[in-house]
Image (cartoon, rainbow, N blue to C red):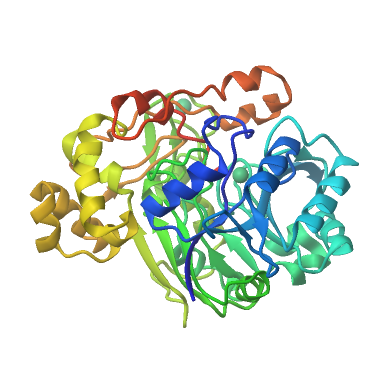
């Protein structure tokens, strides 16, 4: 059975998330997007797990289901901040659990090491190596997956606080690490360049902080599995059943190349290396992007193709495509007015982005939108790369999306009540410009 899965999500108690981010809204918008299996997000959070237990029932096979039968898998993300080898390390980790009972045990174990109630993604002073031990002591069916593995600030390979190899991070427990989430700023093709990752399965999820279809399923993994947790776990561990991944073009990610957002400096890795990674404007150290990190750690040339790898789709959310063509804000009435007829005609967004032909599309939308959908699908249009927290843009178009996200460095501040302010929400009406404010909370994806 095919599942288009988004298994890295957050709920309304996570920092900078919409208050409307609930199980029912997640289900509703998953259907719009074309996502057929979701992570629950944030199961360590006391209020969110209560919400999960109210809205979802275990189906006896390790999936949780809504009243209509829509499936979820228990998933949470934690932040590990510690030092190793004299250096500060900051790594985000995804955890998958086979049952509510095991999820509760995970929370209990983590509570002995810190608080879990201030954020859906709590922080612990636990090493990568130790977290695997802790999880395996609870259940061998818990899976640990390094999240958005390449982002600079909070990732296993991050230029800032990461490691040069999974072995260095996980020590002897490397044998229990079977997959990594590639994150928005990298795609499987970039990861294939490291022969060390040949045995690691590559998955892609959105890390959504809002349910809007330009966040949910922005990245996703297509599984061909039985509808149960064991089959999902088998796919993560062996790669059998991972059929494809849906990627945002990595250049579109906020940390693809090197640079300084405040200095308006964007540099390809080779240019940054020539400058000793020093910003030509402010003379301080550049934020090193994902491509640079991959170049540093890769032992194969760009263009290497991994044998028998799952298919990859490179897509950009439909709302973003429409907003780019119309040069309107992503959540404006004009964008929804172009979006809704397409959705009505073709069922769900991923179907539109992946399958519908140009001729069919242009019957329902502006021909320029139809053309851009096809150009992006076929990768015949250039994306100018993102850097230091600034999204990339489609060549020839200004990025329609104001970037107002918090700097990742603020993560430590999440313990203070001030961070709550960032979680302000607003109305969530579809097809209305009133959704604009909410859309500004674009989430801290990809940290
Ligand atoms: Zn600078
Ligand atoms: Zn994260």
Kindly identify the residue that appears in the image at 25 percent across and 66 percent down: 355
Query: From this viewpoint, is residue 446 visible?
Result: no
Residue 331 in the image, given as x and y percentages of width and height: 32, 32
Identity of the residue furthest to the front in this view: 67
Residue 417 in the image, given as x and y percentages of width and height: 70, 18
- Give the number of callouts: 0
Kindly identify the residue that appears in the image at 72 percent across and 41 percent down: 50
Kindly identify the residue that appears in the image at 49 percent across and 42 percent down: 25
Lateral position of residue 220 relative to residue 138, left or right: left
- Ligand 2 quarter of the rendering: top right
Front residue of 336 and 141: 336
Kindly identify the residue that appears in the image at 34 percent across and 35 percent down: 430
Front residue of 309 and 134: 134
Query: From this viewpoint, is residue 298 visible?
Result: yes
Name which quarter of the figure residue 45 lies in: top right
Quadrant for the C terminus, please.
Answer: top right
Residue 205 in the image, given as x and y percentages of width and height: 51, 55
Front residue of 337 and 92: 337
Residue 178 in the image, given as x and y percentages of width and height: 67, 70
Lateral position of residue 322 relative to residue 5, left or right: left
């Amino acid at each position: 059975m095919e599942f288009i899965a988004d298994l890295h999500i957050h709920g309304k108690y996570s920092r900078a998330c919409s208050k409307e981010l609930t199980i029912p809204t997640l289900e509703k918008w998953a259907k719009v997007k074309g996502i057929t299996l979701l992570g629950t997000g944030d199961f360590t959070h006391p209020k969110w797990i209560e919400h999960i237990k109210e809205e979802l029932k275990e189906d006896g096979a390790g999936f949780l289901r809504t009243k209509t039968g829509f499936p979820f898998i228990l998933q949470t993300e934690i932040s590990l901040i510690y030092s190793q080898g004299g250096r500060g390390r900051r790594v985000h980790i995804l955890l998958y659990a086979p049952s509510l009972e095991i999820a509760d045990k995970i929370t209990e174990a983590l509570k002995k090491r810190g608080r879990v109630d201030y954020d859906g993604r709590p922080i612990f002073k636990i090493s990568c190596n130790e977290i695997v031990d802790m999880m395996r002591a609870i259940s061998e069916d818990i899976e640990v997956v390094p999240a958005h593995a390449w982002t600079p600030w909070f990732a296993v390979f991050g230029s800032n606080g990461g490691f040069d190899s999974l072995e260095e991070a996980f020590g002897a427990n490397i044998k229990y690490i079977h997959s990594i989430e590639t994150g928005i700023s990298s795609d499987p093709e970039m990861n294939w360049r490291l022969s060390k990752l040949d045995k690691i399965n590559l998955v892609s999820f959105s890390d959504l902080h809002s349910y809007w279809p330009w966040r949910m399923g922005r990245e996703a993994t297509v599984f061909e599995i039985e509808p149960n947790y064991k089959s999902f776990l088998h796919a993560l561990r062996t790669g059998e059943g991972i059929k494809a991944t849906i990627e945002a073009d990595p250049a579109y990610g906020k940390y693809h190349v090197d640079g300084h957002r405040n200095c308006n400096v964007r540099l390809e890795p080779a240019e940054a290396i020539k400058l000793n990674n020093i910003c030509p404007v402010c003379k301080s150290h550049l934020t090193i992007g994902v491509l640079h990190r991959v170049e540093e750690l890769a032992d194969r040339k760009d263009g290497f193709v991994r044998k028998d790898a799952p298919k990859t789709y490179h897509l950009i959310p439909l709302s973003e495509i429409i907003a780019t063509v119309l040069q309107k804000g992503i959540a404006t009435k004009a964008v929804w007015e172009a979006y809704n007829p397409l959705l009505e005609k073709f069922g769900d967004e991923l179907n539109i982005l992946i399958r519908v032909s140009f001729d069919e599309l242009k019957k329902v939308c502006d021909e320029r939108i139809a053309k851009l959908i096809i150009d992006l699908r076929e990768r015949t249009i250039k994306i100018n790369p993102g850097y230091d927290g600034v999204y990339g843009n489609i060549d020839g178009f200004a990025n329609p999306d104001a970037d107002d996200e918090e700097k990742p460095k603020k993560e430590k501040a999440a313990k203070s009540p001030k961070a709550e302010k960032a979680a302000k929400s607003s109305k969530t009406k579809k097809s209305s410009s009133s959704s604009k404010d909410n859309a500004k909370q674009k989430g801290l994806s990809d940290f």
